[in-house]
Image (tube, helix red, strand yellow):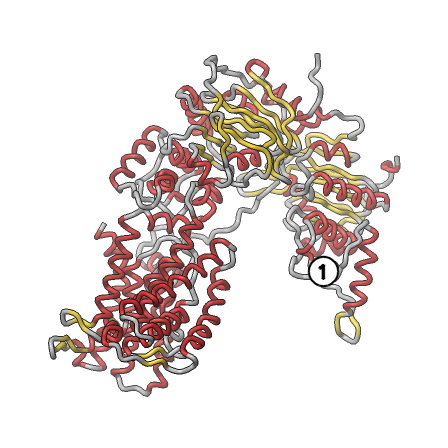
Amino acid sequence: MEQMAEPVLQATGVSKYFPGAIALDEVDLRLYPGEVHALLGENGAGKSTLIKCLTGAYARDGGAILLEGVEIDPRDPLDSQRLGIGTVYQEVNLLPNLTVAENLFLGRQPTRFGFVDHRRMKRDSARILAEYGLEIDPGRLLSSFSIAVQQIVAIARAVEMSGKVLILDEPTASLDREEVELMFSVVRRLTARGLAVVFITHFLDQVFALCDRATILRNGRVVGSRLLREAGQTEIVTLMLGRQLEAATRTPHEAEPGEVLLSFAGFGRRGAIEPFDMTIRSGEVVGLAGLLGSGRSETCAAIFGAAPADRGEARLRGLPVRLGDPREAVGHGLAFCPEDRKIDGIVGDLSVRENIVLALQARQGWAKPISRARAQEIAEGYVKALDIRLAHLDMPIRLLSGGNQQKALLARWLATEPALLILDEPTRGIDVGAHAEILNLIERLRARGMALLVASSEMEELVACAGRVIVLRDRRQVEELTGADISPDAIVRAIAGEEEAA
Amino acid sequence: MIKATLRRIAPQLAILALALALNFIVFPDFFSIRMQNGRLYGNLVDVLNRGAPTALLAIGMTLVIATRGIDLSVGAVMAIAGAVAALAVTSGHHWTAALGAGLLAGAVCGLWNGFLVAVLGIQPIVATLVLMVAGRGVAQLLTEGAILTFNDPGLSGLGSGAILALPTPVWIWVGVALAAGLLVRRTALGMLIEAVGVNERSARLAGVDSRALLIAVYLVAGLCAALAGVIVAGDIKGADANNAGLWMELDAILAVVIGGNSLLGGRFSIAASLLGALIIQSVNSAILLSGMPVEFNLVIKALLIIAILVIQSPKVKRAVYLLRASTGQPARETRPPAPRRPAEEGRT
């Protein structure tokens, strides 16, 4: 292979420190011309930080970057773009209200007599886009095209302006299957021209389909670099997740789950989660496992109607039910603690008391106010039961710590006495003590007959609390583990998509 | 509860007292009130009476702004409602029917705004700009470009009459304010509106029907504007589509802002907005009473308002905090709360 040639980009010993944390610890990365190099790692592993150091968005605290053997020190992303490193992000970083041609040539428009030469710009754009297999009218607004086409325009712009290294930061996160294929064909054309591509994604199948080599980061360190045709998925996943979880123990609950509460058939949402079948029984905890972006959160959001399903059907206690928006879901006894507490959970400026009674009040309707005394009583009850630490109930909830905010949100939903409680990453950003308390709470609620759906990236958590674990990969349910079969190893194998070793 | 409300409106009360004192300085007779023909007269009564349209608009505007919205169309809605009421009464209907027709027109306008904002998801400032421009045109079409005068004592009584010695408009705005206050604070509406204003996504995920709430607040704003429009028409016994309610939306927004309500939505106080409306009216009154040329009116008003807003601005509050910290108690932490930075490490 020509990979024995000189690397086009070589980073050695790149380090970056944040106050109180080492984000990158002596990271090495070699990038060869004509290869697609996957950068893998879980949330917080340091992928974005590394990219930002390479493109100059962050000033690195140590290490050197060589581009074609010459040491470079990009001051900002514009600088690195001029040097030859182009970046395309998940959210299209172009201007949707300009035409495709204007986007391609923004900042370097061809001019004629001092005016922008629109005709030439359009002609050149059409020629450039044709190289990417896109036969579109560059005179139309960027926003009139699909996200996939917009991504390709972004790639074309980055390549035209830089042309040595292309960094793709989760470019496929919001694309569907065919669009991903389109994107891949574009990337393959580029590597055939000798461009080096860094590909960041959470979709392992895409990594194996497209990439030649992978560098895996964990906790700011490179834990391995593998040629993908020699490595297996299990090896990669194990590297990503680390080995510490093999020690996790399981405390199985023996009680038989109750009757079927909710069942789904062909339930799904285009571009978010492939259609799935699922049943949830009263008195059981169903876990959702998978890498980031595998469809865990999307499953939760579809069931709760936050991003409602557009296909399939749901049945509640055997009867068809519509879960079109959160209000309907709440009305049917569903509850949902979302992953991002700050954006989707708390109502920051309102008091803790108001936050706790909000869902109950919303369900009762505005005309039946919960009296202040009653709200106080409810809130105090949960503050005691969940051990929420606060100065007083009148303080704005945004002043609480992450763990206490999470408990207050749990209180909000428990006050509605839900039949199904959906928890998306219930312990993210929470200290160890609160972590254990929340796992205990989940078990207590289950014992009381509540159904719980817990999506988590932490396998020990699922192993500890779930009676059944559904494993997702690339937005599809790929495996269901029950009872004694649930172990971190089994989950890892299922995520990696390999046949269980006999 | 009452103590908390008082603490909330204390700055507005102080500013109002200052504004009234200013009136007293330029016109020592300001506080004298006399009884004549069973009706109270005096500059103070005038402030309450003339402030009625702004006060009514401020009630609706407070609720709209609490949801993180704004309603620029209320001035135009005043013109429409006045025109509709005048048309109804000149074509022989009873004045109560005319009032009803005016309110109905206001309700339709409010629902239109609510539809644009809540259902179509258009930014409030753009959505209501549509009616701000088009609404005045509609009013002009209704009155056929002329001032539509009427002589119905019932309808004009709404603007210029008196009940139990107090001008009718005062009764109306105080009544509406009490009704609105009770409605939002004795039910859960106030809290739900605040929740939508602070974080609509969270509120929606908690099961709050944010769409219905948004439509409702624009409906209330439309009704308040209609009432204000009928009062103004009644006062001059005619519907002046060109001038009725002109720029009044800005006074209403100002009243809400002087009332210390954040334009970013969330916590709101109708009482504070009403005080804001009275402050604006007091400033108007002081300028008139001082006998300065009318041309100075707007400039001086602007200067006073700038002063009020500067006093309330977070930067000034922080500067005061810094000043105190550096001179008063050196032992205390002298660093002001740092401006919040977006999290550096996002998605990885």
Residue at coordinates 57% horizontally, 36% vertically from top-left? A298
* Chain on which label 1 sits: A
Looking at the rendering, in which quadrant would you find the C terminus of chain A? top right
Residue A227 position in % (x across, y down): 79, 30
Q: Quadrant of residue B62?
A: bottom left
Q: Is residue A70 above or below residue A436?
A: below
- Secondary structure of the residue carrying tag 1 is loop
Residue A40 position in % (x across, y down): 68, 35
Q: Is residue B227 above or below residue A376?
A: below
Looking at the rendering, in which quadrant would you find the N terminus of chain A? top right
Q: Is residue A317 above or below residue B96?
A: above
Q: Residues within 10 Å of mark 1 (few under 14, many from 20)?
A: some
Q: Is residue B246 above or below residue A155?
A: below
Q: Amino acid at mark 1?
A: Arg
Residue A61 position in % (x across, y down): 64, 45
Residue at mark 1: A140
Residue A489 position in % (x across, y down): 63, 19
* Residue furthest front in the image: B92
Foreground pick, A35 / A475: A475
Q: Quadrant of residue A192?
A: top right
Foreground pick, A44 / A427: A427
